Image: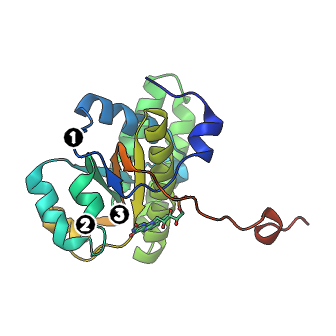
Amino acid sequence: MINNNFEDVVMNRKSVKVFDETVKIPQAEMDEIIQKATKAPSSVNMQPWRFLVVESDEGKDKLRPLIRFNTRQNDTSAEMVVIFGDMQNYEHGEEIYNSAVEHGMMPEDVKDEMLAKVLPYYKSLSKAEMNDIIKIDSSLAAMQFMLVARAYGYDTNPIGGFERDQIAEAFDLDPERYEPVMIVAIGKEKNPGHDSYRLPVDTVTRHV
Ligand SMILES: Cc1cc2nc3c(=O)[nH]c(=O)nc-3n(C[C@H](O)[C@H](O)[C@H](O)COP(=O)(O)O)c2cc1C
């Protein structure tokens, strides 16, 4: 069941902290949600986001000591989705641009020109510069993931409070390569999320 009411999806999204423990999201449905989340834009379309779907009891046991005050979400959510940014995302550059040509999305000469520019540029970036890029791109995917999840009838909580320096290794990922961005708890709400105040538009906006 897809909720196509965009107003409802956006305006009624709230961080949910306590989920219905009996609800799990089937892998095929989770893959669909992730596939739609990855329609998010990214710098030079390099798509540096990587999703680690923690669904098993063993996986959640590994997460529990690493997520500080967020254990309720870990214990009750259907899944905890750890979103990483791949510092070596350019390794997929050829695949992305060649596939665009194969699918008729880009002419061959544009692909050649783009790859000749983008790959050396990305490889030349400092760690700090690449870190900024993957965090911006992956955050867009995380937001889109949360909205798509709502369209599928699920609720989420973005989580930034966790041990960033330990999470990749805990799941046998290279910590130099995979930079944790955010964890998104997902499931069906048990306790509704609270309303939260937003600053007025004129406080956060300047027209020039
Ligand atoms: C990057 C980020 C990190 C967050 N970290 C946590 C967290 O560690 N624990 C938590 O309960 N909520 C966390 N939140 C949720 C915020 O508290 C929540 O989004 C905010 O209060 C607005 O409420 P709403 O999501 O219901 O609109 C985080 C949100 C973001 C965007």
The reply to whether the residue tagged 1 has its Cβ within 8 angstroms of ligand 1 is no
User: Residue 131, image x and y in percent?
Assistant: 43, 70
Q: Secondary structure at mark 2?
A: helix
User: Which callout, 2 or 3, points at the residue further toward the start of the chain?
Assistant: 2
> Seen in the image, is 28 located left or right of residue 194?
left
Q: Amino acid at mark 2?
A: Thr
Task: Give me the C-alpha separation between circle 1 and circle 2.
Answer: 17 Å
Dot 2 corresponds to which residue?
71
Task: Give me the C-alpha separation between circle 2 and circle 3.
Answer: 28 Å
User: Residue 20, image x and y in percent?
Assistant: 29, 45
Dot 3 corresponds to which residue?
87
Q: Amino acid at mark 3?
A: Met
Q: Secondary structure at mark 3?
A: loop
Q: Note whether 132 is above or below 171 in the view shown.
A: below
Q: Note whether 179 is above or below 103 in the view shown.
A: below
User: Which callout, 3 or 1, points at the residue further toward the start of the chain?
Assistant: 1
- The one of 34 and 129 positioned closer to us in this rendering: 34
Residue 38 in sight in this render: no
> Seen in the image, is 113 located left or right of residue 131?
right
| Contact? badges 3 and 1 (CB < 8 Å) | no
Name the outermost residue toward the front: 191
Residue 208 in sight in this render: yes
User: Residue 176, image x and y in percent?
Assistant: 25, 71
User: Residue 4, image x and y in percent?
Assistant: 57, 27
Q: Secondary structure at mark 1?
A: loop
**Which one is in front in this view, the residue at disc 1 or the one at disc 2?**
1
Residue pictured at 16% horizontal, 57% vertical: 60
Q: Quadrant of the C terminus?
A: bottom right
| Contact? badges 2 and 3 (CB < 8 Å) | no
Name the outermost residue toward the right: 208
